[in-house]
Amino acid sequence: MVDDPVKTSRHGKAPIDPAIQSHIGLQLRAMYEETAAEPVPDDLLRLLDALGRGTKVRGDGESTQSKPPLGRKATEGS
Amino acid sequence: MTPAQAALKNELIGSIPSLRAFAITLIGDRDKADDLVQDTLVRAWSHLDTFEPGTNLRSWLFTILKNRFYSVLRKYKREVEDADGKLALGLATPADQPGHMDLQDFQEALTRLPSDQRMALILVGASGFSHEEAAEICGCAIGTIKSRVNRARNRLAAALSVQSAEDFGPDRGMQSVIDGRSTGTDG
């Protein structure tokens, strides 16, 4: 049998304390699920509305530099 | 909007909570995470023709978000000497604090992981993707995902056990209680 790599560290040191191991999983999911349970922010909904109307929208992110090469226009069915 | 588009829009809306959760867990900064989600939705919408109906929309969206994340990271790395993009993405980590490990400590330990490992851990450990799906999203081999997840767990465990061994190890923790107790005859 192969050692469970989750329980044995890469250097073959002491295995991870199972209590810590499960704590990591719980904390991670707690963080994640807390966020996933939030209602969708209004601006994201508005963004999708605008996209659905075919309005030109640009990601409001950090950058207004060049559009990526693949930028094809969403062809709107009439 | 065609009915097909309307249906996709609804699916997109349905995916937003998990996209946000992924982004926020990955980045740690809510505003930047929401920017990333917004960027992802815009790109997804403008590339809907590249989405193959019948395949997993969620995987597709996560892949786009992953690409945007790395592209933002690269951009900041060029601008700032910031090896892991941590400053850029608002992940500047405060000094270690001894004591109890709460969610914030955990989050800090998470942000110290290399982004590849952090991403693999979140995809598999929180987003609920299989190793195979995570490998597709990350564009790497399944074995790579597994080793990233393992390394992430090991690093977190190391960081967190140093930080607060007494919170977890019944051995050490209890031992100190026992050691410190002269005569325990409480009923």
Image (cartoon, rainbow, N blue to C red):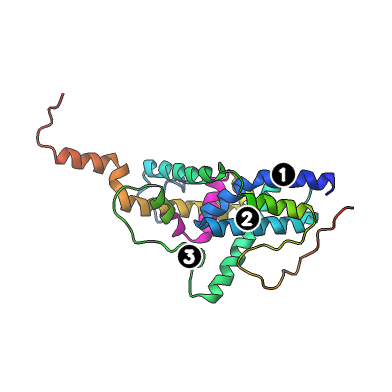
Q: Which residue is mark 2?
A: B37
Q: Is residue B182 visible?
A: yes
Q: Position of residue A11 (x, y in %)?
A: 40, 56
Instruction: Inspect the image, locate mark 1, and give the three-letter code of the amino acid beneath it.
Output: Glu
Q: Earlier in the sequence, mark 3 or mark 2?
A: 2
As drawn, B184 above or below A66: above
Label 3 CA crowd tier, 10 Å (few <14, some 14–19, many 20+): many
Q: Residues within 10 Å of mark 2 (few under 14, many from 20)?
A: many
Residue B125 magenta-highlighted: yes
Kindly identify the residue that appears in the image at 17 percent across and 38 percent down.
B178
Chain letter of disc 1 in the image: B
- How packed mark 1 is, by other alpha carbons closer than 10 Å (few <14, some 14-19, many 20 or more), is few
Are the residues tagged 2 and 1 within 8 Å (C-beta)? Answer: no
Question: Can you give x and y, in whole percent of width and height, for residue B126 in the image?
Answer: 53, 45
Q: In the shown orientation, is residue B187 left or right of residue A28?
A: left
The circle drawn on residue B86 is 3
Q: Which residue is outermost to the top?
A: B187
B125 sits to left or right of A73 = left
Residue type at tag 3: Lys
**Helix, strand or loop for disc 1:** helix
Which residues fall within the magenta stretch? B109-128
Q: Residue A32's spot in the image, x, y percent?
A: 52, 46
Whether residue B132 is visible: no
Residue to which mark 1 is pinned: B11
Q: How far is mark 3 from mark 2, CA to CA?
A: 18 Å
Q: Earlier in the sequence, mark 3 or mark 1?
A: 1
Residue B30: x and y, percent? Answer: 53, 55
